[in-house]
Image (cartoon, helix red, strand yellow):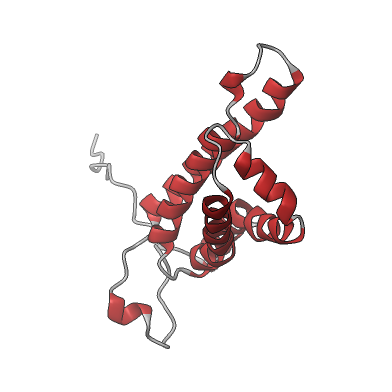
Amino acid sequence: MGSQPRNLNPPSRTTTEHDRLLAFVARLCLVLMFPLSCLNKMFDYQSAMAQAAHGWIPLPPTIAALLLILGGTLEVVGPLCILFGFYRRQAALLFIFYVVATAVLFHNFWSFPFNSDVLNENFWPFLKNFGLAGGFLYIAADAKIESLRGAFSLSPREAQK
């Protein structure tokens, strides 16, 4: 019985255009809500300020306005970075901090009576934010660190994997 030794290591797979397209669509699904959230904050500024003022740690109006501007900037610039690979890891890490902080500060379900409507209105967005944090953690772990010189190059970038 002359069986040949089996190769236990599967052949390395190269990234195809199909894989890159699926990865792009996955990143798009992850970040699509953020620019729209920024628009909502811009057009309903009073509601955004009221939410910031009545969170778990009430914020003074000047701090709330500054955080809304910083958050809105991240919600517009961050998705572009994640979609197109410009400081993708750094943007994903910022989003992890952002979604966890907003979950804890503004969806503090533990402050409300058990099984109340207001608890449920805060519990699911709290969990959603931690699901988003998991997606951003995956993006951060998967992204390559590009050299600074390569980040500003006009030549096309190689695929992320």
Judge by depth and name the residue closer to the eye, 157 or 40. 40
Is 13 left or right of 107, judged from the image as shown?
left
Query: Residue 46 in the image: x percent, y percent?
Result: 73, 52
Residue at the (27%, 45%) spot, across then down: 7
Residue at the (28%, 46%) spot, across then down: 9
In the displayed structure, 118 sits above or below 34; it is above
Q: Quadrant of residue 72?
A: bottom right
In the displayed structure, 119 sits above or below 13; it is above
> Which residue is most to the bottom?
154
Q: For the N terminus, give its image quadrant.
A: top left
Is 64 left or right of 33, judged from the image as shown?
left
Judge by depth and name the residue closer to the eye, 2 or 16. 16
Q: Is residue 18 visible?
A: no
Q: Quadrant of residue 144?
A: bottom left
Residue at the (40%, 74%) spot, across then down: 158
Query: Residue 151 in the image: x percent, y percent?
Result: 36, 77
Residue at the (61%, 24%) spot, across then down: 109
